[in-house]
Amino acid sequence: MSAVTTAIRRSAIGLGLFAIITGGTIALTQGLTKDRIQEQAARAEARALFEIIPESQHDNDLLKDVVALPASERLPVEGPVRAWVARKDGRPIGMILPTVAPDGYSGNIRLLVGLDLQGRVLGVRVTSHKETPGLGDRIETRKSDWIYGFDGKSLGNPAPNAWNVKKNGGIFDQFTGATITPRAVVKAVQKTLVYFRQNREIIRERVNAPPEPGKRRLSPEAIAADTQPAEHS
């Protein structure tokens, strides 16, 4: 066997071992950090819930008072829509819905949208995204106050054709050098309001039905069987 052939074989073996070790290290790292990442995501979500509807405004356990609502392509989340309900003296005062803006500049932008039972926005928060730092990340409250512009808005305020960034004839500001990100968020919030309008009766029925004393409210998974997809307009 020539020296060249031997050198090639050794290189191939070395590369193979390197790939195996590298792959194993990546898999091990992912396994060790998966739970931590999920915990951090859960904490971020919980923090956002109480930013939208502060604890001073309700007296129930917002994190546990959850109802399942009809699935819809307008809120592209997996399975039935999980809605957190805020109550004061047993009366529902608002709810928070998760949604996804699938058309962000760098992929999905996950949001929480708070609404009162008349369909007015109580607040919007971004829980995760991969938008460009210094440009698209201004959807975060720690980077700018842009997201507060949704507070108090509804389907009629502004008019439907004004639910866009100013560059496209709407009322919402775009970011310098970044139009795609804010436009995606605006559309996602508008779709959430349309979802609420289309499902208003079943939403009111479920949020107005508190669990019986001594019983915990059923999880979204437990009542998914009777949850039917919403009609799309």
Image: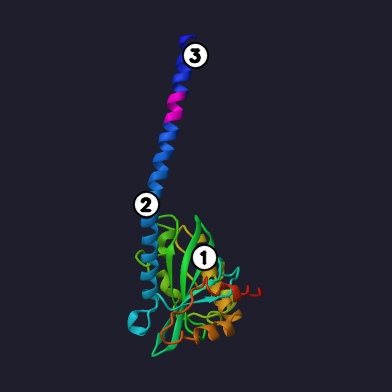
Q: In the image, residue 89 lies at what x, y percent?
A: 38, 90
Neighbour tally class for label 1: few under 14, some 14-19, many 20 plus, Cα within 10 Å: many
Q: Earlier in the sequence, mark 2 or mark 1?
A: 2
- Label 3: which secondary element: helix
Nearer to us in this view, 166 or 159? 159
Instruction: Identify the mark at residue 5; answer none if there is no mark.
Output: 3
For residue 143: magenta?
no
Nearer to us in this view, 145 or 32? 32
Q: Are marks 3 and 2 in contact (CB under 8 Å)?
A: no
Q: Earlier in the sequence, mark 1 or mark 3?
A: 3
Q: Which residues are magenta?
A: 13-17
According to the picture, the residue beneath numbered tag 1 turns out to be: 100
Q: Amino acid at mark 3?
A: Thr
As measured in the structure, the alpha-carbon distance from the residue carrying label 2 to the one carrying label 1 is 24 Å
Q: Quadrant of the C terminus?
A: bottom right
According to the picture, the residue beneath numbered tag 2 turns out to be: 33
Q: How is the image coloured?
A: rainbow
Residue 61: which quarter of the image? bottom left
Q: Amino acid at mark 1?
A: Val
Nearer to us in this view, 125 or 97? 97
Closer to the eye: label 2 or 1: 2
Query: Which residue corresponds to the image point at 40% horizontal and 54% vertical from the top-left?
Result: 34
Q: Amino acid at mark 2?
A: Thr
- Label 1: which secondary element: strand
As measured in the structure, the alpha-carbon distance from the residue carrying label 1 to the one carrying label 3 is 55 Å
Horizontal side of 153 relative to 230 (left or right) equals: left
As measured in the structure, the alpha-carbon distance from the residue carrying label 3 to the one carrying label 2 is 42 Å
Q: In the image, residue 13 lies at what x, y percent?
A: 45, 24
